[in-house]
Amino acid sequence: MKLYDYNRDNAVNYARKWALSRNRAYNDYEKYGGDCTNYISQCLFAGGIPFDTSGRDMTQKWYWYSDSARSPSWTSASAFRRYFMSKQNTQDPKTGLVCQFIDKNQLEIGDLVQKKVDGALTHTMIITGFVYDDNGNVIDYLLCQHSDDFLDLPLSQKVGELSYIKILGYYK
């Protein structure tokens, strides 16, 4: 089965364009608990990850056609995690997003960071750049997010339990 590429540059360009505003083509979920994962899903879609409607149940699907025709994984940090984890553990034909947990020093632009508070997954962010020291070594990572909108916020300013997610591509 072929693994298709994720266009990190397109995802990051989208993330930077819409970090401080909303794309009216999509709903804003801020009033429903946050817009972070909706925004991240838009970034992944801009990076070429296609909708995934092939799973046996909603935990294995990721899509947004309208507010009333969307998967929970498009807008919820915890449902998004369940979605990509279900893709790793299924015996079904592989489709959809392919991710893996990594160490922070393996992050590339377009990869994701998720945050837990008191054991609950509450937030999703995207890596959009790096901060370098005078010798060219990465000393921090820049991220964009919704739900407290930020453009190129240093990752070092985030506190709490963080997990780092490498986007490898997708199967179709």
Image (cartoon, grey):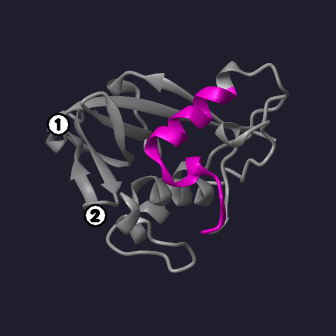
Picture layout, residue 147 above or below residue 141: below
Q: Position of residue 28 (x, y in %)?
A: 45, 71
Q: Nearer the viewer, residue 22 or 55?
A: 55
Kind of element beneath mark 2: loop
Q: Is residue 78 magenta?
A: yes
The range drawn in magenta is 67-87
Q: Quadrant of the N terminus?
A: top right
Q: CA distance from mark 2 to mark 1?
A: 16 Å
Q: Quadrant of the C terminus?
A: top right
Which residue bears the numbered disc 1? 159
Q: Are marks 2 and 1 in contact (CB under 8 Å)?
A: no
Would you identify the image quadrant in which residue 48 lies? bottom right
Residue at (69% x, 43% y) in the render = 58
Which residue bears the numbered disc 2? 149
Q: Nearer the viewer, residue 170 or 58?
A: 58
Q: Relative to residue 104, is residue 153 drawn left or right?
A: left
Q: Amino acid at mark 2?
A: Asp
